[in-house]
Image (cartoon, coloured by chain):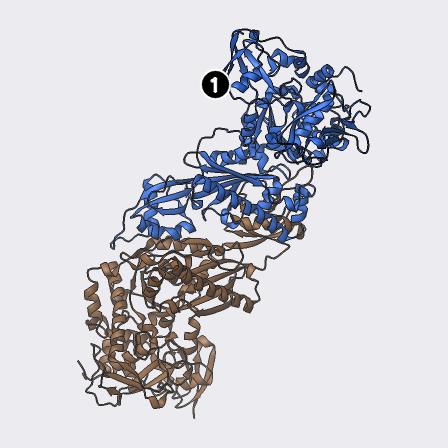
Chain colours: A brown, B blue
């Protein structure tokens, strides 16, 4: 028994190993969680790691690994953690890429943290006032502005209405020392007795059509002090955006109702976050909210009706600032809500926040950002030029329109592999509970695995001639993942022919959108240095499965970065920095918008992209290679 | 019977007369109402007119006239209309000065009309939009701003929240033609379908501590379309300002209550005015409100507590703009309320409005403005320098603290004369109803008449030795105006020794304030070219009686101008003109403030001014002359 070390540099952890142990074993020893759906049998291909140094202490690449990994990946040191066995004494340096990290994936939902120089719209200053005398009477306001001028504030500061009503009493209660809350160095919005400068908070909110996430930030420290989230309470009024638009368009009352439930939800989240962090609601002085254009409109009480009618114009494409109390948000009565600009009817403030968080618009190299949802926003570009579009990708990636589809809740099958030797499936569920259905990442994984194992062909058709009890041909052809005897729902959970078609339609929408943007900028897939996958689905999906079905351009996997709820990240950045708000305004003016429906090549691109991964396999060299490895010319 | 003509030039009327008819008879013939309390017996001296031409056709000056009019006045052609009898054929040109006009006085309550070049804060524009296409999608806001730019509006216009929510539907309902309401050429506050440019209104409000007056103006035409007024509903919480401050200072709830009743009252007045003029409340887009500093603070919900505590600072001395809906005013939801600046704790936005209306700050010659109320604001100056003070004149001029005092309501004795031959009184009541009490102008008139007839001496003491049943000595000495048999109230209505003292205190406060301002500017009474008497009391009082008791400096009566509710006039001017608002800001910075309590000479000035008209009779040459005429050295 020879001992050796496996060093997981990013985690700062080292595991001692004996001959025959795998890297997966090493990871388990030091409590690092690596995806391994098949339980470490080399079948699912999810436990990819990169050996950076000391490859000579491991055994050679196994047959299973060479089937799961492309030539380029193998050359770069990629291995499957379950297959890479320790051989002899020495130290091996291993990197776990984001797509293989279980913990990391969950955390990423919070969104990437992009550093901003802290300069929030709202700040507090302690000001000492001189008293006025009978001989030289000055108004309280004059004394306050004199005090502010002594603190270096400009003299054109105006005093807001709420501050005006607080000022006279606060000045005397504080014995001529008051804390002044300033907005944008221009307006006094609050006057409090004594020193309360430590208590200044802000709220960042991402209103997704499915989920609302709220982040409470300490504006002095620039840090999140509490988060809270809840399902979007508009769901009962319409699962998808269009049906909510339709409901809201039926009258002023309906619109107010949809607005009301969202505001009530945000108020509840703010209350929860404040309670969790021990913050007083009146010390929350600022808010930033992002959402797609329809969520944006409904939140503000603007009819979203015309957003859904050609040519799909948003009511406003510049940023909007409204008073929190005007829309019923319960925080400090003088607080404003800043809503970043919309690019177009279907590229909203949330996509702008994605761009802010990923800083595409600052980078020299070409990036693409894909925020996957029922509508998928894509932004392609760099510091020179940025272009965007929206794809009607439908609800399949969120488990919608899928026979046994469900949200990514406990019991949802989220990872799937198929053993090519016997076409038997393996899967992992959210929370490792007994299976109840299939969520978005699960269905993509399943389709990729079915393609890889030849259960479906490039047209997405299930090969009903294959010899497997899992493939059923009565009624709609389907592939059974879980027999009813193995689960609690009382029926077989399967992937149907229609489910595969839904995925094909959804991924074709995204891929053809990305392709048309690339055409507009005259760039090719290989020039893309970074693929940002945003949104909950984008975070949980296996990037290799996604590229296998042809969801986005075939780029080396290390260029794919999960940015989770990047919209929330962008909202937090805008909350912390006036510069970010200003650049959002400039950025949006610079973001081109392509209306896919008006693009002459859209129909052809879409049709070609319906195939798996694509009609033109030269666009997916990595996938072509893997398919060739797996399938010895079985289908097509 | 010789016929002749009396021409009343200002009225454009001519009356034919026979020998022996008086000018008063002539006026009655052509329906011109001239004050004549004594019924035309030459006793009250209220029917003063000026004969400009054709004096030779009248009989000579009678003994009664020479007793009522000063030498200077006689030289200028002043006559009493009831005494000036027509003698022989010819045309006589007669002028009726404001103080003698019954109708005119009533009208003047509305306040003087000072011309302003119309440039209201709010205006409407009809804008035609171009539609956007799929190839070049533009947001509704972009299209609207493009349309505004084509109408010559600057491109930095922002779209307010309410307008944003109206815009998408208004654009389609108006088939791409909308009426845009702009504020200060900077902000779109309303978007309506089609052409509504004719419907744009504003509200000017004067919140007096006693009465609230509201004026609804057509902002296109610059004209008042309806007015409404009501007693200030705060009266039950405190008759005078200080007791209201005291009530409001007891807690946030009390302040909100006082604010609430005023706002509710203004809402009612606006509703009444809108109904009267057939105007929709949502077409009222702007408001200007004036009031003294305490009314200003309470209206805005600012604690007035410290205004009443030395050194009496106002919370704010610059102008304030708040959203109407923030304080509960029910007009267009995007409307603002502009409140002019305050000069000091007791020289408020109403005094500033007085200054705007009288244009003291623009004039080369020296003027004094006296806005008589419980607190009397005085402003003295010209274009070079302006100075102000506030006098605690108390409620006597409004009938308060007077034994049989009442407001100037029907039945209130408003004019009094005393027949020097028998010390019998005569009076006129408001509405010519049976007497119920004495109002402010009545009590000043009574004191002046009592002084003139020797019933009181210069110390204000009633001469109880005089032989008249009207003078009672049991209890507090008093002079009976109306026996209970002659009225409906069931008791005698009298002027008591204490009432006289109240008037002495009140007029001394005003006169000493005016004197101290004159000292500060190193000017003398004779240099004052114009005395503006503002406020309801100032309008109804007999200026000769007022000067007789020594209320303000002894200047020729023709220099006295009644400006009625000048504060309301100033509010209307600020509603119609952004320039007036700007100059109000500049003006206030230029208005000096003298705190009388801190002036070393105040106590002496006040004490000397307690005498009737003043300890130093050389300051009141006209009055001295009249007193000498009337009283043959009878008292003191």
Q: Can residue B219 be seen in this view?
A: yes
> Which of the 4 image quarters holds residue B508?
top right
Q: In this view, does A374 lie to the left or right of A166?
A: left
> Which of the 4 image quarters holds residue A546?
bottom left
Q: What element carries label 1?
A: loop
Which quarter of the rendered picture does the N terminus of chain B lie within? top right
Residue lying at the far left in this picture: please name it. Answer: A636
- Where A6 sits versus A339, above or below? below
- Where A284 sits versus B260, above or below? below
User: Badge 1 sits on which subunit?
Assistant: B
- Where A417 sits versus B460, above or below? below
Which quarter of the rendered picture does the C terminus of chain B lie within? top right
Residue wearing tag 1: B12
- Find residue B41 and report its horizontal and vertical position in percent: 65, 18
Circle 1 Cα neighbour tier, 10 Å, few/some/many (<14 / 14–19 / ≥20): few
Q: Which of B76 and A568 is in front in this view?
A: B76
Residue lying at the far front in this picture: please name it. Answer: B485
Q: Can residue B392 be seen in this view?
A: no
- Find residue B221 and report its horizontal and vertical position in percent: 41, 34
Q: In this view, does B354 lie to the left or right of A434?
A: right
- Find residue B163 and report its horizontal and vertical position in percent: 40, 49
Residue found 20% across the figure and 76% down from its top:
A459
């Amino acid at each position: 028994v020879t001992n050796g070390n496996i060093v997981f540099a990013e985690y700062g952890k080292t595991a001692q190993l004996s001959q025959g142990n795998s890297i997966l074993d090493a990871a388990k020893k030091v409590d690092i969680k690596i995806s391994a759906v098949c339980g470490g049998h080399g079948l699912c291909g999810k436990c990819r790691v990169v050996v950076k140094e000391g490859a000579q202490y491991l055994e050679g690449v196994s047959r299973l690994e060479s089937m799961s990994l492309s030539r380029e990946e193998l050359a770069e040191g990629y291995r499957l953690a379950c297959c890479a066995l320790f051989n002899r004494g020495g130290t091996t340096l291993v990197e776990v890429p984001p797509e293989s990290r279980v913990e990391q994936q969950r955390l990423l939902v919070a969104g990437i943290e992009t550093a901003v120089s802290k300069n929030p719209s709202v700040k507090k200053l302690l000001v000492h006032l001189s008293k006025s005398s009978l001989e030289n009477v000055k108004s309280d306001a004059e004394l306050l502005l004199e005090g502010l001028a002594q603190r270096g504030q400009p003299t054109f500061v105006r005093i807001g209405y709420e501050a005006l009503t607080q000022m006279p009493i606060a000045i005397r209660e504080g014995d001529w020392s008051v804390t002044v809350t300033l907005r944008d160095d221009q307006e006094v919005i609050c006057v409090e007795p004594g020193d309360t400068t430590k208590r200044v908070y802000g709220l960042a909110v991402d209103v997704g059509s499915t989920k609302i996430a709220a982040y409470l930030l300490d504006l002095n420290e620039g840090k999140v002090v509490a988060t809270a989230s809840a399902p979007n309470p508009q769901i009962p009024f319409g699962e998808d955006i269009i049906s909510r638009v339709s409901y809201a368009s039926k009258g002023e009352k309906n619109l107010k109702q949809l607005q009301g439930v969202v505001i009530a939800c945000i108020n509840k989240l703010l209350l929860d976050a404040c309670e969790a962090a021990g913050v007083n609601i009146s010390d929350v002085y600022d808010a930033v909210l992002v959402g797609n254009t329809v969520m944006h409109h409904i939140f503000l009480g603007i009819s979203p009706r015309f957003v859904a009618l050609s040519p799909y114009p948003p009511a406003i494409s510049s940023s909007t600032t409204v008073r929190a109390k005007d829309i019923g948000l319960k925080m400090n009565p003088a607080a404003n809500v800043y809503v970043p600009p919309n690019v177009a009817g279907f590229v909203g403030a949330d996509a702008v926040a994605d761009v802010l968080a990923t800083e595409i618009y600052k980078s020299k190299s070409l990036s693409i950002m894909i925020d996957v949802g029922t509508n998928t926003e894509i932004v392609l570009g760099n510091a020179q030029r940025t272009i965007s579009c929206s794809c009607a990708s439908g609800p399949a990636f969120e488990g919608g329109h899928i026979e046994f589809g469900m949200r990514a809740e406990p019991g949802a099958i989220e990872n799937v592999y198929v053993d090519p030797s016997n076409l038997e499936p393996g899967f992992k569920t959210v929370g490792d509970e007994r299976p109840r259905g299939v969520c978005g990442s699960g269905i993509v994984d399943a389709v990729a695995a079915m393609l890889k194992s030849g259960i479906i062909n490039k047209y997405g058709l299930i090969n009903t001639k294959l010899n497997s009890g899992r493939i059923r041909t009565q009624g709609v052809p389907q592939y059974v993942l879980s027999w009813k005897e193995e689960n609690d729902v009382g029926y077989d959970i399967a992937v149907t022919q229609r489910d595969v078609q839904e995925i094909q339609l959804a991924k074709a929408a995204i891929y053809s959108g990305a392709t048309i943007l690339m055409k507009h900028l005259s760039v090719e897939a290989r020039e893309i240095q970074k693929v940002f996958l945003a949104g909950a689905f984008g975070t949980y999906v296996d990037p290799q499965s996604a590229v296998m079905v042809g969801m986005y351009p075939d780029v080396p996997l290390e260029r794919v970065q999960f940015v989770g709820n990047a919209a929330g990240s962008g909202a937090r950045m805008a909350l912390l920095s006036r510069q970010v708000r200003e650049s959002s305004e400039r950025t949006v003016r610079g973001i081109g918008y392509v209306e896919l429906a008006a693009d002459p090549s859209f129909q052809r691109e879409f049709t070609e992209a319906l195939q798996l991964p694509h009609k033109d396999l030269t666009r997916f060299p990595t996938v072509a290679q893997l398919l060739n490895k797996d399938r010895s010319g079985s289908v097509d």
